[in-house]
Amino acid sequence: MAHLGLVGIGVMGSAFAQNLAENGHNVSLLDRSIEQPQKVAKAGAAQGLKGKLLPFDRAEAFVASLTRPRSILVLVPSGGPLDAVIGTLSPLLDTSDLIADLGNSYYHETERRVEELEAKGLQFLGMGISGGAEGARHGPSIMAGGSAASWAQVKTPLQDAAAKFGETPCCDWFGPGGSGHFIKMLHNGIEYADMQQIAEAYGFMRDGLGLTAPEIAEVFKGWMTGPLNSYLIEIAGEVAAASDPKGGGAMLDMILDKAGQKGTGRWSVIEALHLGSPASMMQAAVEARNISADLEGRKEMEAIFGAAPKPITGDKAQMLAQLEQAMIAAKVCVYVQGFEVLEKASTAFEWSLDLAAIARVWRAGCIIRSVFLDEIAAMFDTGGSTNLSLAPVFRDRLIENTPALRQLVATAIAHGQSVPALFAALGFFDMRRTGRSTANMIQGLRDYFGAHGFERLDTLGQNANGPWHGKN
Ligand code: 6PG
């Protein structure tokens, strides 16, 4: 018998099954054909993993192999394929049995699934896991949402399998319904913004400063010794340093500049907009991917208008130092925006999210892991403000680095370098630190055409109208 079931033995499923077995858990594996589960079970035995992996291709036998209450982890594509698996499994399950979705599902769908399965007496957990196949095998970051009882049922094996920051597992339960998947979605929104910033820095160095890919790799490597130290900067260095096994030149130079996306970044922006929370850097990142995908359209425009980026002359070392500082300032802005979305979601959906715990599970295993997140966790742990830009460490970083961000963005724009995420960071920072904004004009216009009213500075709290149309 096994005390865990795993459905979907693809790249991630195979890796996670072996991880669980390595940690001493017996796991039944179900896939449409027996070959893949058998292959993974054999590989597990050959590695001498402590737990047993039992292969199945029939749902009935798979369910019968599990100890009660049953806990079944599902790692199949979200949407239709996941609903099909739930449809097959749920009639075979008994009260209190649990299905946990480890895919990147939209949290609205998770909420629906929780309701539908709980109505049948079953339990459902929506669980985001981050870290790719490598993470799944050696320790992912795990963000769970659903009932407390269902979490208690799978907490131990998942914490065993999760990445550890020191001794602490990067695996936690955050609240009911779709809260776990919401947090994973936002993790990906931040991932998009982080990656877009990196791509902009790369473009500035390649097209502005004329650096080669190996030279750019060295710059990224250098950033690993400062506040930008993170998994994404580390792998950006590795991507830029790699040579093409076919032609021998830089691998990066041979990669088509069309970015893919599966939806989590877009959902993050949509949800942030619904919550009225600024997410301009994630939005810039999603739009940049959208525009990149239209290669033919970009080529057509370039033929008419000419290529935008122009070489930047000047002291390269100084500009690279400025770029690093600009990246630091912008990174603070990404996390300010990200944590505000989480805070607003927590209030709006009554999830009582523990922001410190979220920062803690992002410190290892996940794609956005960085030194920054440890600092954010420490800041929340000491009861710091949820506005990260006011916490001393981030406030000082903004004070120190936003002048460089301004200079860098100005230089980039003057030379036709497209830096939408860095620009969005600066625009966000400038708006947020402006006590007297220009929204009085918006209010005046709204009142002029629609009599929407406004507050006068001398009678705050009361509705007033303007003198237009001879009314007042
Ligand atoms: C992770 C990644 C993972 C996956 C994303 C990529 O945290 O491990 O975010 O979930 O790589 O789905 O998303 P896009 O294909 O949209 O870039």
Image: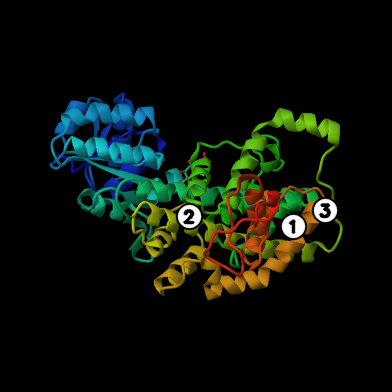
| Three-letter amino acid code of the residue under disc 3 | Ala
Residue 460 in the image: above or below residue 172: below
Look at the numbered discs 1 and 3 and tell me whether their residues touch, using CB distance below 8 Å.
no
Look at the numbered discs 1 and 2 and tell me whether their residues touch, using CB distance below 8 Å.
no
CA gap, disc 1 and disc 3: 8 Å
Of circles 1 and 2, the one toward us is 2
Question: What residue would you read off at disc 3?
Answer: 414
CA gap, disc 2 and disc 3: 32 Å
Residue 408 in the image: above or below residue 11: below
CA gap, disc 1 and disc 2: 25 Å
Camera-side residue: 294 or 429?
429
* Residue 243 placement: quadrant: top right
Residue drawn 81% across and 43% down?
A: 308
Q: Secondary structure at mark 2?
A: helix
Determine which of the numbered discs, if any, sits on residue 341 in the image: 2
Lower sequence index among marks 2 and 3: 2
Determine which of the numbered discs, if any, sits on residue 166 in the image: none
Residue 19: % across, % down = 33, 47
Residue 110 in the image: above or below residue 433: above
